[in-house]
Amino acid sequence: MPTADRLGPYRLLSRLGAGGFGEVHLALDPEGRTVAVKVLHPHVAADETAVARLAREVETMRRVRGAHIAEILDASLEGTRPYIVTRYVQGRSLAALLAGGEPLRGGDLMRLARGLAEALAAIHGAGVVHRDLKPANVIIADGEPYVIDFGIAYALDSASVTASGAVLGTPGYLAPEVLEGGSVGPEADVFSLGATLAYAASGRQPYGTGPASAVAYRVVHHPPDLGEVPAWLAPLLEECLRTAPAERPTAERLCARLGTVAPPPMEPRRAAGGDEPTTMEWRPARARDERASSTSVEEARARHREKVRRRWVVSTGVVAGLAAAAAEAYVPEVALLLLSVYGVGVLVDAGVGLAAGTRARAVFDLVSGAGTVGLYALLSTVFSPFTLLLALATVLVVLVMVAFAG
């Protein structure tokens, strides 16, 4: 049962805003992570047909994953307060950023274009149509865009919901085929992306402002206003905003044109021996990023440590072999001691490698030990003791200089 500050397992912290379908709250999940909980408005929740359709679509929507997606994490669509849980992205909506009339330029605009194209490619790759892509449904955080509320408008497409006050889309961002009551596919999202980017790039609505009916008429019968859009982007937006859906590029094509890579299509996981897809395991994007970052850092550190160890084994081997060869003519016992100490050290290090299951480390150590003995034998045979002493002194001086320089 929901309480004033709790809904299911989620603790509601504060109200973030409201839209046509529900109120959005900042909340904590059972593990203490921040999430966004969208609670459906009572008049939406009262439409059993729409909510049942949303329940069927949620499992498909949960398959959508992407770097620029505020993915759906959980949903409870029973009871008096149905809700959907998504990843919380702390930032401002693109609509709020553009409210002052200042357009995006340069790198900011390119990041927006690439991020939205990647997000649509991920959404469409999972078989979902957003249907309500607009500046209010794009969150900007640290300069990167994140798409929210994908698929909800499509799932709640119901006459009773619409009659109760929820608007399925915003004129000026809805494709002509949507306004004319035609079939809606991924092409409609591409149109919405074009309109959103045109607004971001120019600071002006591409189909003007005014009554919704007037804006909708211009969408269907007039070309968009792209006069203030930068020259590098205008041709692409013209293609996105074409009236005929078949003439618009796909999200994957947009990614290619913008110099980014579309994420691979998501395939539903299937239960063993069955035909029904199973729910994909959820791991928060931030946690995934932190784990990936932590893993990559640890791997880099391990590689660095191994590189330093190998250099140390080789360099000490060279010094030991050179010193033993130089001492051979004067104090043979010292030569034997140097080789013995180095050999024991190599054997111990090789043993540690074998104990850790790192066979390559042990092989490298043994080869280095054999090489040191071979170097000693070669140097003591070919060069005079005085030459070897000069070479040893030079090597030691160089090593000291390198050590202090580091």
Image (cartoon, rainbow, N blue to C red):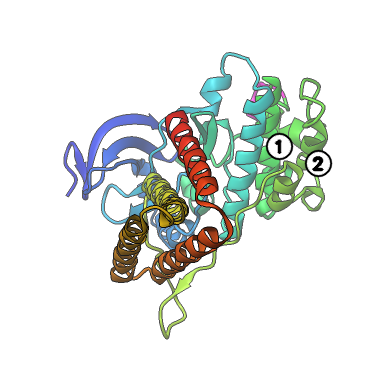
Badge 2 marks a residue whose secondary structure is: helix
Residue 16, how many percent across, how many down? 36, 30
Q: Position of residue 316 (x, y in %)?
A: 42, 51
Q: Residue 141 — which label?
A: none
Q: Say how many tags the image has.
A: 2
Q: Which residues are magenta?
A: 208-212
Q: Tell me if mark 1 has few (under 14), some (14-19) or many (20+) residues whose alpha carbon lies within 10 angstroms of its own.
A: many
Q: Nearer the viewer, residue 104 or 364?
A: 364
Is 76 above or below relative to 205? below
The answer to whether one can see residue 65 in this image is yes
Residue at 39%, 68% (x, y): give it: 362
Three-letter code, disc 2: Glu
User: In this image, 326 relative to 104: left or right?
Assistant: left
Q: Residue at the spot x=70%, y=46% of the render?
A: 255
Q: Residue flagged by tag 1: what amino acid is it? A: Gly
**Picture quarter with the C terminus:** top left
**x then y, percent, for residue 230:** 78, 24
| Contact between labelled residues 1 and 2, with CB atoms less than 8 Å apart | yes
| Residue indicated by mark 1 | 194
Residue 238: x and y, percent?
Answer: 81, 36
Closer-to-camera residue (382/247): 382
Which is nearer the eye, 378 or 349?
378
**Label placed on residue 239:** 2
Left or right of 172 on screen, residue 95: left
Q: Is the residue 268 above or below the residue 247 in the image?
A: below
> Is residue 100 shown in magenta?
no
> Left or right: 182 with respect to 334?
right
Q: Residue at x 76, y 41 (%)?
A: 240
